[in-house]
Amino acid sequence: MKEIIKNTWLYSIARRIYYFLTPDYHYPNPVGSELKQLKRVLYSTNWNSSYSTSGLHYKLEKEFADFIGCNYAVAVNTGGMALQMIFRGLGLKPGDEVVHQVDTCVATSYAILNSFCTPTFADVDMNSFMLNKDELLGNITDRTKIILPVHMWGNAENMSTIADIAAKKNLLIVEDACLSLGAECENKKIGSFGKAAAFSFGCLKPIQAGEGGMIVTNDSNLAKELRILRDWGETTKELGYRDQKHLSWNGRMSEFVASVALEQLKGYPDHLKLLRENVDCFSQYINSIPGLSIIHTANKSVYTQVVIKINPKLFPISKNEFIEKLKT
């Protein structure tokens, strides 16, 4: 125990020296030419995507879809809005249920409620902290329309199991991938398994642009519907005539956000490679301490957050005490 506390204090000293030697370090940080792209937008006439016919958000959509391995991407203003738009675009109605794991951000269930549907909470597995299969099956009713796997902390859900259940129950899969850009399951990118998937560029996300979100899908009709929904239901761009037939939102992404997200995406592979190397090193150290372990799944994580599990029988410090030691 003394050695653990000693190492914690050594880390604290090393961290303060590092910050002193690198005063410009901050997080989130630029990983591409964000400032250059922002200046280009600032000195252009394309600030708002509703007036742009050749803006950066189109380029971002193309490159994002290619990165995930989907045919279409639709840029929106937040990840929560992305989920709401997906539910509306799929035609969900009041009384329809969406089942997802209970351990997730409130934005997940709020998006369902704001679509006038009902969230149903399934518990998680105590080892992986991902969806528990039996809990998922037990919460599916005749009103359930969608399984919403949430890829928490950068870890990928077991999508083959979820896909099997969805197929047997005749349900759609919509992925909440806001925390897990680049994560993989069975060598396939998260976001490419279901009818659609939502991503976020907001706080604590794999790539950050201040705000912003993205929807990916392989359904051309759904993509068209989503592009209409993000622009107050205006049909001119997609259908060639002006009309508003559906209750919609202003879900557009500004060109400023698109410029930052585009550069973040370009620099993300190198950033992710370094992140994984650092977590491997960190994991070796943590796993060498009796009673501490890093939560891993069988799939390829992007470690948006690194989760440490404490065995109180082997590590006789409370969680709160441990957190306070890490802050020093």
Image: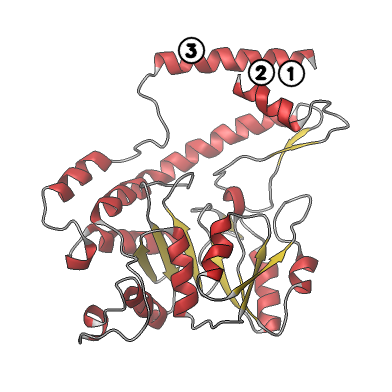
Residue drawn 35% across and 66% down?
251
In the picture, measured across the screen, residue 238 lies left or right of residue 210, that is left
* Lateral position of residue 137 relative to residue 218, left or right: right
What mark, if any, has residue 4 been given in the picture? Answer: 1
Q: Which residue is mark 2?
A: 8
Provide the residue designation for mark 3.
17
Tell which of 68 and 239 is nearer to you: 239
Q: Amino acid at mark 3?
A: Ile
Check disc 2 and give the amino acid type: Thr
- The residue type indicated by label 1 comes to Ile
Query: Which quarter of the rendering shows the C terminus?
Result: top right
Where residue 112 appears, as percent x and y from the top left, is 55, 69
Instruction: Judge by depth and name the residue closer to the eye, 234 or 306.
Output: 234
Q: Verify CB contact (< 8 Å) between mark 1 and mark 2.
A: yes
Name the quarter where the N terminus is drawn.
top right
Q: Using the rendered view, name the quadrant where residue 14 is placed.
A: top right
* Residue at position x 21%, y 85% in the image: 242
Kindly identify the residue that appears in the image at 67 percent across and 21 percent down.
325
| Place of residue 218 in the rendered image (x, y in percent of width and height, measured from the top left) | 44, 75
| Real-space CA distance between mark 2 and mark 3, rounded to the nearest whole angstrom | 14 Å
Residue density around tag 2, few if under 14, some if 14–19, many if 20 or more, within 10 Å:
some
Q: How far apart in space, not on screen, are marks 1 and 2 (Cα)?
A: 6 Å
